[in-house]
Image (tube, helix red, strand yellow):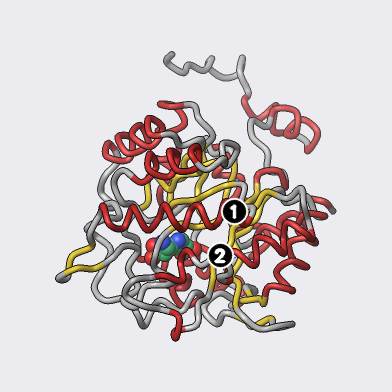
Amino acid sequence: MKPTIAPFPAARPRRVRQTPAIRALVRENTLTPDDLIWPVFVRDGVNIEEPVPSMPGVMRRSVDLIAKAAKEAWELGVPAICLFPYTDPSLKTEDCAEAWNPDNLCNRAIRAIKEAAPEMAVMTDVALDPYNINGHDGFVENGEIVNDRTVEALVKMTLAQAEAGADIIGPSDMMDGRIKAMRDALEAEGHQKVMILSYSAKYASSYYGPFRDAVGASGALTGDKKTYQMDPGNSDEAMRLIQRDLNEGADMVMIKPGQPYLDICRRAKDMFGVPTFAYQVSGEYAMIQAAAQNGWIDGEKIMLESLLCFKRAGCDGVLTYFAPAVARLLND
Ligand code: PBG
């Protein structure tokens, strides 16, 4: 279809922009709390809420306070939460065994949230980086990130999270073959209902910097993640990876980062029509907060606009650190 528009004065497109009522009637996309997944950082201890310096407004919380915050977010209408552990450096090893410890921080937080807000969907991140001495998402052998041995470890991690009560598994590691391996293991172990939201198109991005501070991985990381995360110049490759993950058993897919990759979101939704999510990552969040704190932009308005644009680009929802704040604004 070629867009046409009748010549002036027969058509006056401004007619449908006259008033808030008419604009609301013709609006094609809207943002609601239903669209939000809240990523949170959990740390050890009791009754601790510690700010992340490079992410103003974001906290690392102990398990008890994560459960409390999850309940509050659920009551504001946020349907899902996604957990990231800030692991004590003493628990980071080369074999990453803490990743599948049934009582690790993440698994304790899953149980606590399930008790505080049983209906809230709990999502996890599957990758070895919080537990790896060198900060990589996979095992390192002779300076290389090895695929198949990493996938075996990711499967153990997945099963431990499912046992703890996770509803949605979020593999963010970008290894090959992991979705099939995880799906097979979940089926075999009685976790048929556990969903997989695959970080299918995850780019080797510089927008993750503040996150790596938040989980304490910045100092640890040796080298970069370019042999497993995608090249920011590629778009066809993202479609191939989404296709592959769907074939292997993913229920939902993610594009990450978010705002600079809206073209990928739109293409993915048009091509596959499956539940599609974007991650408004830590760097995007930090940029908005920094400019807002300086009074250079209106933080609240940009927060709402940036999230609405994900909907317009075809996303069904967004992982955003703004989730509770947005839900509060939208409810008012
Ligand atoms: C780890 C992981 C990362 C993020 C989510 N999961 C960082 C990375 O790949 O280095 C980034 C999230 C953000 O920046 O907000 N596998």
User: Is the residue marked by circle 1 packed among few (<14), some (14-19), or many (20+) residues within 10 Å?
Assistant: some
Q: Quadrant of residue 323?
A: bottom right
- Furthest toward the right, the residue is 332
Locate residue 105, reporting x and y percent.
Answer: 58, 71
Q: What residue is shown at x 65% (from left), y 60% (from top)?
A: 110
Q: Is residue 46 above or below residue 317?
A: below
Q: What residue is shown at x 71% (from left), y 43% (from top)?
A: 34
Locate residue 312, reporting x and y percent.
Answer: 56, 37
Q: What residue is shown at x 50% (from left), y 37% (from top)?
A: 187
Q: What residue is shown at x 44% (from left), y 86% (from top)?
A: 90
- Indicate the amino acid at tag 1: Glu
Is residue 207 in view from this perspective? no
Q: Quadrant of residue 107?
A: bottom right
Query: Quick check: which quadrant has ligand 1?
Result: bottom left
State yes or no: discs 2 and 1 in contact (Cβ < 8 Å). Answer: yes
Locate residue 44, reporting x and y percent.
Answer: 61, 80
Q: Is residue 123 above or below residue 93?
A: above
Dot 2 or dot 1: first in sequence order is 2
- Indicate the amino acid at tag 2: Pro
Q: Is mark 1 within 8 Å of ligand 1?
A: no
Q: Residue tagged by mark 1?
A: 163
Locate residue 116, reporting x and y percent.
Answer: 79, 60
Who is closer to the viewer here, 275 or 251? 251
Element marked by disc 1:
helix
- Furthest toward the bottom, the residue is 90
| Side (left or right) of 264 relative to 49 | left
- Residue 294 circle label: none
Q: Is residue 246 above or below residue 117?
A: above
The residues bearing labels 2 and 1 have C-alpha atoms spaced at a distance of: 8 Å
Q: Residue tagged by mark 2?
A: 102
Who is closer to the viewer here, 331 or 25? 331
Element marked by disc 2:
loop
